[in-house]
Image (cartoon, grey):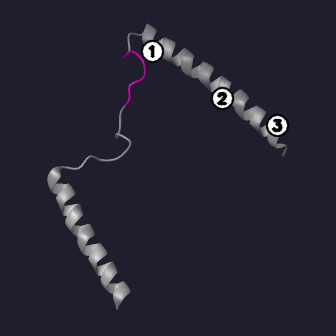
Amino acid sequence: MDLYKAIQELYAEKEKLERVIASLEELQRAAGGAPGLVRGGKRRGRKSMSAKERQEVSERMKKYWASRRKQRTD
C-alpha cells in the first residue's frame, strides 16, 4: 500500500469524524445538554506525594543506594 495514499485516507477519515463530532455537539447544545465536552476519569501526569510519602521514598532510596555501593565494593 502506498504510504502517501494511506495518510490521505486517514486525513479524510479524520475530517469526517470531526464533522460528525461537531454535529453531535451541536445537537447536544440544542437539547440543553452539558455545555462543551465533559471531561471525566483520572487525572494524567504525576501523582503528588505528601510529605510523609516523600520521606518514605527518601529512606527507601537511601537504603537502595547504600546496598548498591556495598555490592560494588565487595
Predominant secondary structure in magenta?
loop
Residue sitting at x 38%, y 41% = 44
Q: Quadrant of residue 23?
A: top right
Residue linked to disc 1: 28
- Name the residue rendered at 71%, 34% in the picture: 10
Considering every residue shown, the one lying at the far front of the view is 73
69 to 29, vertically: above or below:
below
Question: Which residue corresponds to mark 2?
Answer: 14
Nearer to me, 43 or 17: 43
Instruction: Name the foreground residue: 47 vs 62.
Output: 62
How much space separates mark 1 and mark 3, taking CA atoms?
Answer: 35 Å
Q: Position of residue 45 (x, y in %)?
A: 38, 44
Marks 1 and 2: CB-CB under 8 Å?
Answer: no
* Quadrant housing the C terminus: bottom left
Secondary structure under tag 1 reads: helix
Q: Is residue 17 left or right of residue 57?
A: right
* Amino acid type shown at disc 1: Gln
Residue at 23% x, 50% y: name it.
Answer: 49
Residue 38 vertical placement versus 68 (above, below): above
Based on the picture, tell me whether residue 29 belongs to the magenta stretch: no
SS category of the residue bearing label 2: helix
Q: Nearer the viewer, mark 1 or mark 3?
A: 3
Percent of width and height locating residue 62: 24, 70
Q: Which residues are magenta?
A: 34-39
Q: Secondary structure at mark 3?
A: helix
Q: Position of residue 47 (x, y in %)?
A: 30, 47
In which image quadrant can residue 31 be found? top left
**Mark 2 neighbour class, 10 Å CA radius: few under 14, some 14 to 19, many 20 or more:** few
Residue drawn at x 84%, y 46% as measured from the top left: 1
Distance from Cα at disc 1 to Cα at disc 2 = 21 Å
Query: Which comes sooner in the sequence, label 1 or label 2?
Result: 2
Q: Which residue is mark 3?
A: 5
